[in-house]
Amino acid sequence: MIVRKQMQILESRISEPRRFIQVLAGPRQVGKTTLIGQLAERMTSPVSSYTADGVEAGDSEWIADCWNAVRVEMRMLHQEVHVLIIDEIHKILRWSEIVKREWDADTRNGINIKVVLLGSSRLMLRDGLKESLAGRFELIRMPHWSYDEMKEAFGFSIEQFIYFGGYPGAAALVGNENRWRSYVRNAIVAPAIEKDVLLTKSILKPALLRQLFELGCSYSGELLSFNKILGQLNDAGNTSTLANYLNTLGEAHLLCGFHKFARDEARKYQSVPKYQVFNTALMSAYKGKGFLAELKDRKRWGRWVESAIGAYIANYAEEYGYNVYYWRNDSGQEVDFIVEREDELLALEVKSGRRADNEGLHLFQKQYPFSQTLVVGSGGISVETFLSADINSLFA
């Protein structure tokens, strides 16, 4: 069984003296619960694990009950330290207030309970941690599975990874694409939207959010204005509603929209978004005609390759502290991805037969001469090499 690299970070922090709550955050089906199970097996200290899945959202004192059970066990068995794990905690209303209360009580009373919380990506981070638990937690992000992980665990080829993406739970079903597609839609997407997004955020038009998600998956790697979307969706409301919903989907690590790169902040955020799935399985489940059919159509396959590169970049942007954009000038020349880290710029062009030249890349570097450039695919480093690389190594 694969042990993801976040295990080393979490295990190291748990072995330290009690100092911070450890928060393991990431989208559905990336192995958070599995990793916690692996951690429990490796721990020498007592471990108690609970999940909020199935608990009434308003029952915030359930958290306190779990905490008190650990305190009682520590007293009865004369334990000096105990690890408390709570999964899916973001589903409980006011969870961060209760966690703060119990954590602070242990701190005052010298009770050595080390706490690990699991939740869904930035939905949990923004709406709980920063409000009540500021200064009390450390965040460990778990992105979607990488190409190297899917290759090691399931023997995926680079082409299979580009099309079927990085959901380990769906990997065994790729031989039956109808079954695979149904699993991705019903067992991954539906719970992610209905349980993570709709129960965590105030969404006035949930049907609209679902439509935007499905349309955005179909347009991954392409530009599509909100005004054009208004004509394709039912009860679309206005562009501000769509922009807010797209931000929410991005916080759930499902679908995001890259802005156009510009030095003028207003021009950035008023630009037409370029849609990007965080996992190409989502694009294939809603757009794909089948693995072999897409692989044979080189023009369409180029969209999958570009989306796979974009997904890899997007998954690590928050962890490594960089921003991602696209670039396009008034004449239509473009660059697929602009990665900005502090004062550094990396212009990245994906070559898969879709465009025959690198004119956009050359024009961008002429306008921003301090930038680095990189071609992935034909005439540059291979797609497989890029998807196996450490993103940080791309910066000189």
Image: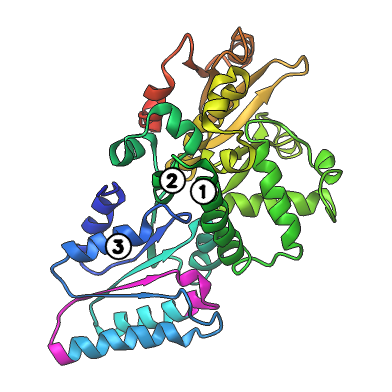
Residue 36 is tagged as: 3
| x 30%, y 82%: residue | 106
Q: Which residues are magenta?
A: 76-97
Task: Residue 350 in the image: state x and y as whole percent.
Answer: 54, 20
* Nearer the observer, 167 or 81: 167
Above or below, 307 relative to 244: above
Tag 2 near tag 3, CB within 8 Å: no
Task: Residue 334 in the image: state x and y as whole percent.
Answer: 66, 19
On screen, residue 117 versus residue 3, left or right, reads: right
User: What's the distance in space between the residues labelled 2 and 3, CA to CA?
Assistant: 25 Å
| x 81%, y 49%: residue | 233
User: What's the distance in space between the residues labelled 1 and 2, CA to CA?
Assistant: 7 Å
Q: Earlier in the sequence, mark 2 or mark 3?
A: 3
Nearer the camera: disc 1 or disc 3: 1
Q: Earlier in the sequence, mark 1 or mark 3?
A: 3
Is disc 1 placed on a helix, strand or loop? Answer: helix
Q: Quadrant of residue 38?
A: bottom left
Q: Amino acid at mark 1?
A: Arg
Mark 1 surroundings within 10 Å by alpha-carbon count, few (fewer than 14), some (14 through 19), many (20 or more): few
Q: Amino acid at mark 3?
A: Ile
* Nearer the observer, 22 or 66: 66
Q: Amino acid at mark 2?
A: Leu
Residue under numbered circle 2: 173
Task: Residue 255 in the image: state x and y as whole percent.
Answer: 60, 45
Residue under numbered circle 1: 179
| x 59%, y 39%: residue | 283
Mark 2 surroundings within 10 Å by alpha-carbon count, few (fewer than 14), some (14 through 19), many (20 or more): some
Is disc 3 placed on a helix, strand or loop? Answer: helix
User: What's the distance in space between the residues labelled 1 and 3, CA to CA?
Assistant: 29 Å
Above or below, 142 relative to 304: below
Q: Earlier in the sequence, mark 1 or mark 2?
A: 2
| x 48%, y 31%: residue | 162
